[in-house]
Amino acid sequence: MPNVRLSDVAQHAGVSTKTVSNVVHGYVHVRESTRAKVQRAIDELGYRPNLRGRNLATGRTGMIALAFPDLRIPYFAELAHVLSRAAGERGYRLLLEESGDAPDVERAMLSAQEAGVVDGVLLQPSWLNSTEIAQHRRGVPVVLLGESAAPLTLDHVRIDNIAAAAQVVEHLAALGRRRIAFLCAEESAPSETSRQRLIGYQQGLEHCGLPVDASLIVTGRVADAHSAARALGAALDDGMAPDAVFCRDDLVALGALRALGERGLRVPEDVAVTGWDDSTLASAVRPSLTCVRADEAELARRALDLLIERIEGFDGLGRHEFVAHSLVVRESAPRPAV
Amino acid sequence: MPNVRLSDVAQHAGVSTKTVSNVVHGYVHVRESTRAKVQRAIDELGYRPNLRGRNLATGRTGMIALAFPDLRIPYFAELAHVLSRAAGERGYRLLLEESGDAPDVERAMLSAQEAGVVDGVLLQPSWLNSTEIAQHRRGVPVVLLGESAAPLTLDHVRIDNIAAAAQVVEHLAALGRRRIAFLCAEESAPSETSRQRLIGYQQGLEHCGLPVDASLIVTGRVADAHSAARALGAALDDGMAPDAVFCRDDLVALGALRALGERGLRVPEDVAVTGWDDSTLASAVRPSLTCVRADEAELARRALDLLIERIEGFDGLGRHEFVAHSLVVRESAPRPAV
DNA sequence: CTGAAAGCGCTTACAG
DNA sequence: CTGAAAGCGCTTACAG
C-alpha cells in the first residue's frame, strides 16, 4: 500500500515533481510556503523515495562491494566491521562478497558484472596475480587491499608486511630468543602474504645477527589452527627446538599454543609466540597474543577515500599506499625486562 | 565506455528490444537464427545488462539485508557466512547491516527505509522488544532470527534455547558436577537470550535434582571475554567455588578459561566449562570448548525459504520455527567415563 | 515468433 | 523560485 510516488506528492501539493524533488533534497531555494505545503503532502501520503528510481536516474547505487576470502577468518570480519562503519559515514553501504575457494568470484568482482549493483569495489585478492588483476579490470572502480602484488594501474592500500615481520623478529630477539621458527608458509606456491612475512622474518634475523635456518620454517595450511597445531607438533616431535614461534596469523598462533601446550612447553617461558592481525581472540585467549596490528581505521579511511575519488571520476595511475601498523605486546611474548 | 544499452543491441541486430530481452533471458521461443544474430550483436558490442534498469522495471533488487548486532562477534560472522552462501544459491545477495549499539538501525531495517534497496530483511534484534517490532513493521518482508520474543505476525527461526541449556546442565551433571555456575547474565534488563538460557539452566538443575543457587549466577557484560573474566574472577575471589561454569557464549567461556587459569584451577579437572555457538575459536582454543551448536545450515535454509515465500507474496500469519541444535563435546567438559 | 509502446520512479538541464 | 518534459535502461502486457 505505501506505493506513493513522487508524482503523487506533486499532484497532492499542486506543484511539479521538480519542486517535490527540491524539497526532498533539502534544496535551499524553495519558498517557505511551498516547502511547507510539499512537506505536508509528504507526511499525509507517507511518501518515501524509491531508491531504485533514484539509482537509475543518477547512475549511482550508493553501494560498495567488499570482497575477501572468508568472513569466518576473524581478521576479515573485523575488516568488514571497520569498513562498513567508515563507508556508512561517507554515505555508502557495503555489500559483502566472499571469494572462498573460487577465483571466479574475484574475476567477477573485477569485471563489469558488478556495474549497476555497486559503484565501486574493494578487493582483497587471494587467487589472482597481478597480471590477471590488471587484465580483468573492466569498468568498475576498484581499490585493492592486502599483500598481493598489485598492478600499477590500480590503487592499493596495505601495511608494510616486511617491516612489520622484521619488527616481530627484533622483538623476539630482544627477548633473548635465538631459534625463532616461522609457522607457517603454504606447502606449495606460498601466498604473497607469506612471502613478504618471510622476507621480513629473514631481514629481522639478519639484522639481529641471527642465523637463517631453513629447518625452522614450518609449512602447513594457513589461517587454520588445527592444521597449524599438527604441522608444528610434527616438527617438534621431529626434534625442532625453537625458543620462539613467529606465527603468520592469529589462528595459526592458536594452533601453536596448542601444539606447545600439549608437549608441556610453557608460553612464553620456554617458547615465545607471536600472532598477526590482533583479532578479538588475540586478546581473549590465554596467554594473550603479542601480535602485529594494522591500523584498520586508517586503512578503511584511505581505501574508501581512494575508491570514492575513482567513483567521482579520478582516472590517474594507481596509488600505492602503506598505512601504519604496530606491534601489540601481550603475554605470549612480553616486553623484555630492562 | 562499455555503456552499451539493450536498445543499442536491438538496433545493431535489427530487432526490437523485446527480442533482445528474450535472448538475454534465454526465453525458449526465439527462432534460432534470430537468437544467433542477437547473440552476435551482444558479443560484438560487449553488452551487459544494467541491473538498475532491470530492478526498476521488475521491482526486485535480488538483495536481502541481514541485520545483527556486531560482525566482530564470531557467531555472527559465521551466521553471515552461512547465510550468504545459502542466499547465493537462491539467487540473492546479502547486504550486511550491523545494529551495534543503535536501536535506530533495527527500526530502520523494519521500516520501509529498506524498500527499494532490498527485497527482504533477516533481522536478529537485540534492542527492540516484540511490541516495538510489531509496530515498526511497514512493508518490507521480514524474518526474525534469534532468541528475542517475536510478534505473532512475523516469521521467526531459532533454536530451542531452553532445551539446549537444560541439556548442557545435564551433561555437566552426568560428569558429576554439582555446583554449576552461570556466566553471565546482563546486570540489568537481561536479554531474552540470557533469560531463556537461564530458564533452561534452572530446568536442567531441577531435572537432575540439583539445588538452584542464585549465588552461582554471575552477572557481567555479555559476549566479551575480558569483562567475563573479571566478573568470574571477582566471584571466585569472593569465595564462590563452582565445579563447572555454564557460559552464555564462547567469548564468555574464553574469559572463564582465563579467570580459572589465573587462579590455578584446571579445566576440566577442577572446573568444567561450556560455551555456546561453536564458533571457530571454540575448537581452536585449548582446552577446546564443549558447547551448544545451532544447525546453522538448516537455520539459513529455513530463514531464507520463509523470507522468499514472503517476497513472493505469501501474506499469512507468522511462522515460528525451531531448527536443530546439538551439544558438541570437547576437552573443556568431556564425555563422562562409562 | 516478434514489434511498438508504455511504464517502473526518480533526476535534471532548460526555460521562464 | 518553479514547471514541463525528456531521459536513466530495462521489462512486459498487448497486438499481430
Image (cartoon, coloured by chain):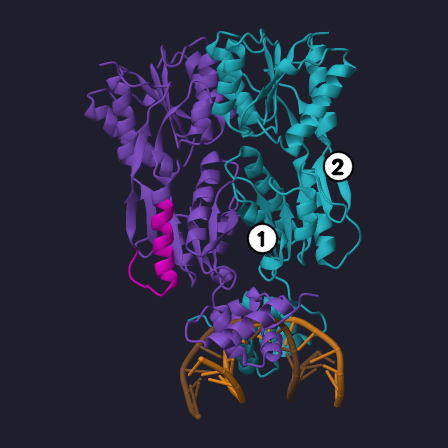
Chain colours: A purple, B cyan, C brown, D orange
Q: Are marks 2 and 1 on the same chain?
A: yes
Give the number of the disc on residue B108: 1
Mark 2 or 1 closer to N-term?
1
**The N terminus of chain A, quarter of image:** bottom right
Mark 1 surroundings: few (<14), some (14-19) or many (≥20) residues within 10 A: some
The secondary structure type at the circle numbered 1 is: helix
* Horizontal relation, residue C9 to residue A265: left or right: right
Dominant secondary structure, magenta: helix
The secondary structure type at the circle numbered 2 is: strand
* Residue A118 image position (x, y, % from top left): 49, 59
What is the three-letter code of the residue carrying label 2?
Phe
Residue at horizontal 58 percent and vertical 58 percent from the top: B113
Is residue A150 visible to us here? no
Chain under numbered label 1? B
Residue A308 included in the magenta stretch of the image? yes
Residue B35 included in the magenta stretch of the image? no
